[in-house]
Amino acid sequence: MNAAAALAGIEEFLHWRQNPNYSDKVLGPGYMDNYAYAELIGPHGFFAGDDFLMGLLLLGPGIHYRDHHHAAPELYWLLTGPSQWRQGNGDFEMHEAGETIWHEPHAVHATRSGASPLLAVWAWTRDVSEPARLAAAP
């Protein structure tokens, strides 16, 4: 079974959510209509997790998830691509489906989806009680 078929099998049970710190006012018009995440492991997922979260991130086409950070170290496994990712003050780098991306705790990072939506598996491996926060605008 491929990932798409597995996700289709649980689609009706996914509880899509949004970070309460985000809004169209700070992220741009239409952002909130094109962003959501669902926990697979965690308080809103299929399995409990007190210091480990895992889920799905969905960004619509052409979305810029601007610089943000969080205490939890984070792993992404890209199910679609291409998409662009940046850490710190570096340049955006193109990544394809199947690649993984690692963010150290408190590392500022950003993501841009391309012409197609971005779907990725994400995991926070500790310090999960602190939500992601947007970095100060440049």
Image (cartoon, rainbow, N blue to C red):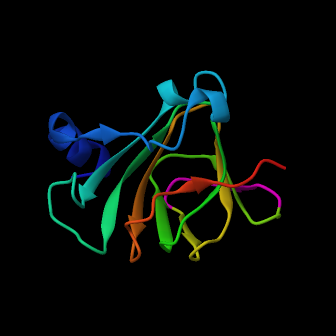
Q: Is residue 132 above or below residue 60?
A: below
Instruction: Compare residues 85 and 49 and report the one nearer the observer.
Output: 49
Residue drawn 46% across the image and 61% down it: 77
Q: How many marks?
A: 0
Question: What secondary structure prevails in the magenta region?
Answer: loop
Percent of width and height locating residue 80: 49, 46
Residue drawn 30% across the image and 75% down it: 51
Q: Is residue 93 left or right of residue 121?
A: right
Q: Is residue 83 above or below residue 41?
A: above
Residue drawn 15% across the image and 40% down it: 13
Quadrant in the rendering for residue 69:
bottom right
Percent of width and height locating residue 16: 31, 38
Quadrant in the rendering for residue 17:
top left
In the image, the segment drawn in magenta is: 91-98
Quadrant in the rendering for residue 122:
bottom left
Percent of width and height locating residue 49: 22, 69
Instruction: Compare residues 134 and 1 and report the one nearer the observer.
Output: 134
Q: Is residue 44 above or below residue 87?
A: above
